[in-house]
Image (cartoon, rainbow, N blue to C red):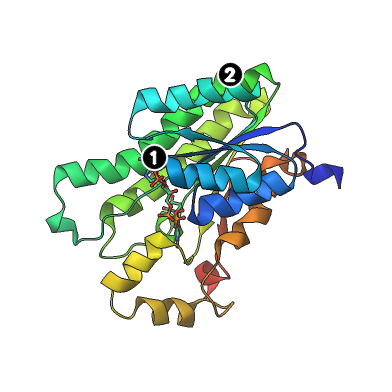
């Protein structure tokens, strides 16, 4: 269906070499987009890019220059930039009183500041092609709290508010900015959490109406929808993709 066709579009997915990012990258590629897999681990990114017929560009979203170079290299190699998925993210699990300031900053800078800089760098390129799509990845921690995740929750709450503010600014330019809030998804990130936090696996299963953890493949559809003309009048939203976790009373 044309509504969801991404033929001729170019997408950048930060952290696209694994987990949720790769799930989204696969969806975008299947819908016809040329996808840039952007991450620090060059070998992992190259393998993912080869699988989906895209290209890999090395980036550390903690480095402003890297984020700006990512956009320049994308346009130099693929001619344009239409879609940016700000998915790269980390967590450091501790009680709030235990974080060093460096750890706090590392989480905020990876998850929130990196997304801001990538979006800012992408903006002029999206203007040149007459519009664009920015998809920011939040979390259930954009809505809820947990004792072991203070900087992460701050960064993911910030993602939602940044999304709203940017969507207001850029709607006139035909750039839609939306956030996706994943529930509990089986990836490297949460495999660590399940080791560190006793009972987490069972608590998630019990609270998720769908009765299972999510999979990276669950993010292909929402990525295509938010990247395509099907969502042209949708902006500033934060959409949970969580098997019902956030609505279970
Ligand atoms: P993974 O750990 O599997 O993937 C994280 C990705 O981010 C990797 O591809 C990694 O690539 C990249 N990344 C991390 N730091 C940087 C950096 N400084 N520069 C560039 N890339 C970086 O985790 P998930 O797939 O689970 O997480 C993806 C996103 O989804 C994150 O924003 C996370 O917060 C969010 N999320 C995940 C949930 C879950 O249950 N799994 C729930 C809610 C949100 P590389 O190492 O090569 O740099």
Residue pointed to by mark 1 = 40
Using the rendered image of the protein, determine whether residue 15 is visible from the camera's viewpoint.
Answer: no
Give the vertical position of 144 relative to 169 (above or below). below
Total marks in image: 2
Relative side of 130 to 81, left or right: right
Q: Residue at x 46, y 47 (%)?
A: 44
Q: Is mark 1 within 8 Å of ligand 1?
A: yes
Residue pointed to by mark 2 = 76
Question: Secondary structure beneath disc 1?
Answer: loop
Q: Could you give the CA–CA distance between mark 1 and mark 2, rounded to whole angstroms?
A: 20 Å
Question: Secondary structure beneath disc 2?
Answer: helix
Q: Residue furthest right?
A: 1
Between disc 1 and disc 2, whose residue precedes?
1
The disc at residue 56 is none
How many other residues sit within 10 Å of disc 1, few (<14), some (14-19) or many (≥20)? some
Picture quarter containing residue 170?
top right
Of 48 and 79, which appears nearest the observer? 48
Of 236 and 116, which appears nearest the observer? 116
Q: Residue at x 45, y 62 (%)?
A: 187
Q: Residue at x 62, y 38 (%)?
A: 54
Residue 37 at x, y percent in the picture: 53, 40
Relative side of 199 to 103, left or right: right
Give the vertical position of 244 relative to 30 (above or below). below
Give the vertical position of 91 relative to 242 (above or below). above
Using the rendered image of the protein, determine whether residue 31 is visible from the camera's viewpoint.
Answer: yes
Q: Residue at x 29, y 59 (%)?
A: 149
How many other residues sit within 10 Å of disc 2, few (<14), some (14-19) or many (≥20)? few
Residue 210 at x, y percent in the picture: 59, 77
Residue 230 at x, y percent in the picture: 77, 44
């Amino acid at each position: 269906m044309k509504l969801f066709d991404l033929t001729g579009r170019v997408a950048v997915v930060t952290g696209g070499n694994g987990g949720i990012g790769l799930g989204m990258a696969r969806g975008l590629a299947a819908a016809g987009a040329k996808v840039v897999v952007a991450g620090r681990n060059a070998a992992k990114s190259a393998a993912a890019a080869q699988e989906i017929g895209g290209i890999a560009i090395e980036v550390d979203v903690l480095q402003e220059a890297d984020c700006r170079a990512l956009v320049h290299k994308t346009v130099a190699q693929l001619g344009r930039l239409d879609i940016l998925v700000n998915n790269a993210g980390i967590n450091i699990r501790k009680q709030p009183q235990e974080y060093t300031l460096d750890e706090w900053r590392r989480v905020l800078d990876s998850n929130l500041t990196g997304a801001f800089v990538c979006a800012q760098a992408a903006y002029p390129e999206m203007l040149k092609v007459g519009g664009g799509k920015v998809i920011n990845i939040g979390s259930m921690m954009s809505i809820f709290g947990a004792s072991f995740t203070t900087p992460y929750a701050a960064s993911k709450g910030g993602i939602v508010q940044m999304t709203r503010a940017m969507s207001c600014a850029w709607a006139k330019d035909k750039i839609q900015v939306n956030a996706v809030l994943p529930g509990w998804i089986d990836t490297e990130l949460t495999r660590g959490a399940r080791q560190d936090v006793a009972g987490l696996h069972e608590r998630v299963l019990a609270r998720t109406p769908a009765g299972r953890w999510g999979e990276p493949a669950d993010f292909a559809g929402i990525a295509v929808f938010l990247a395509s003309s099907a969502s042209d009048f949708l902006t500033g939203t934060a959409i949970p993709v969580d098997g019902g976790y956030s609505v279970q009373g």
